[in-house]
Amino acid sequence: MDFDPLATQLIIFIGLLTGTSAFAWGILAYPLGIAPKASARYALANLLVILGLFLSTCRDDSTSYLFWFGADLSLLSGFILLRWGTQQLFKIRDSIRIDCLFLFSVALIMLLFKPHYSANIQLGILFSLATFIIFSQLALDHFIHFKEVKGSNIVIIPITAIALIFFTRAIILLFAPQAEDHLASIAKAEAVPMLWTYIILTLVINIAMFGNALTRLVDKVRSRAEKDYLTGLWNRRAVLLSLDRIHHLWLRNGTRYSVILFDLDYFKKVNDNYGHAAGDAVLKQTANCVNNVIRTTDVLSRYGGEEFLLLLPATNEEEVLLIAQKLKETVSDNSLNWQGEFINVTASFGCATVEKNNSQQELINRADIAMYKAKAAGRDTYYQA
């Protein structure tokens, strides 16, 4: 195949760009260990794109399944790996089986055409439609993820644009086959604008994926900074920030809220009699059983060693007592089976509802006083400030 000099330079540049991206993703996967599984898939995706590009440049007047079908399937496999990497990064259900079935179906349809320039337009349409479907699904994965986490979904725009570009390419080749040299060839001078488009797409998709990986890293760091390492609950710093938001909401619209501060009874004896591993298990079980019965709007945190703080938005004095009773029963009903021996777990609860001129710290202090009154009353009970 005779290549236009500028087209040749652009193809080499695409290869270098993709190779650099593969290397960068490999560094992220190992030794940096940043989203290693997802990064490894992104690295392999770029390598498959390089392979597909190389095979495409080897096409000539002879019939070759490798240079035609192999090239297109390699490129499509790279695009699918981009999707798998994103699914791994976002921790959403993978589509490996469906995508493999889709790729197999595309391969079967390819067999209907001769792997030669005589079928260049038909294969170009098939490849474009397959790419459109893959990137549409990739955009959908991003939409679902960012909708659930309430994050910025601006990354969906370039991915959707890529899908639309390939759909447009398929339509033009279908209804204007005279555009073959511009859209279905990489060797001629007419293909230069399309090659520039491919360069931009390569940059955009890798930048978007790098953005995803960095966002995931930032979220992970933030989560570790705000979560208790043992129970997975919010830590003291995080719950106080939530308390500030709820308090300012009350100041603005008058919606009262309550807090419950509770402490596990005789927790030191658990550590002394059974060991700290048993104590950790008690803390985790308490966190889980309480988390399972509170509302989604409530905020549960590990406030201290064996002390927990629960924020209850839009909750008055009567309602907080009902919640405290439910929590008391929940905790006491969940004894821990530790190495064949049952450890009874109870807690003392202090309830407080915000009053006029209360600061956040004053409200917690009131709940703390109520909690110690519950302990003085014999423990395994609740008391209201």
Image (spheres, grey):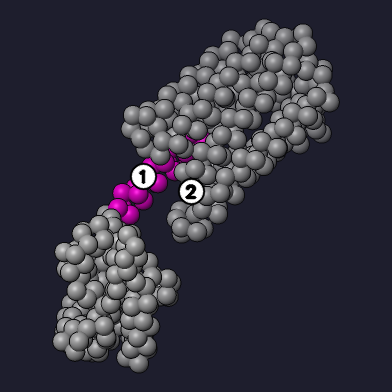
Give me the residue at 50% from left, 24% from top. 18
Q: Residue furthest front?
A: 340
255 or 5, which is in the foreground?
A: 255
Residue bounds of the magenta highlight: 205-224
34 or 192, which is in the foreground?
A: 34
* Element assignment for label 2: loop
* Quadrant position of the N terminus in the picture: top right
Magenta stretch encompasses residue 212: yes
Front position among marks 2 and 1: 2
Q: Report the residue marked by disc 2.
A: 91
Residue kind at label 1, given as amino acid type:
Leu
Q: Report the residue marked by disc 1.
A: 217
* Quadrant position of the C terminus in the picture: bottom left
Q: Give the image location of residue 91, x and y in percent.
A: 48, 48
Q: Residue furthest bottom?
A: 318
Left or right side of 240 for 315 = right
Left or right side of 351 for 111 = right
* Vertical side of 138 occupied by 377: above or below: below
Give me the residue at 60% from left, 35% from top. 80
* Vertical side of 206 occupied by 308: above or below: below
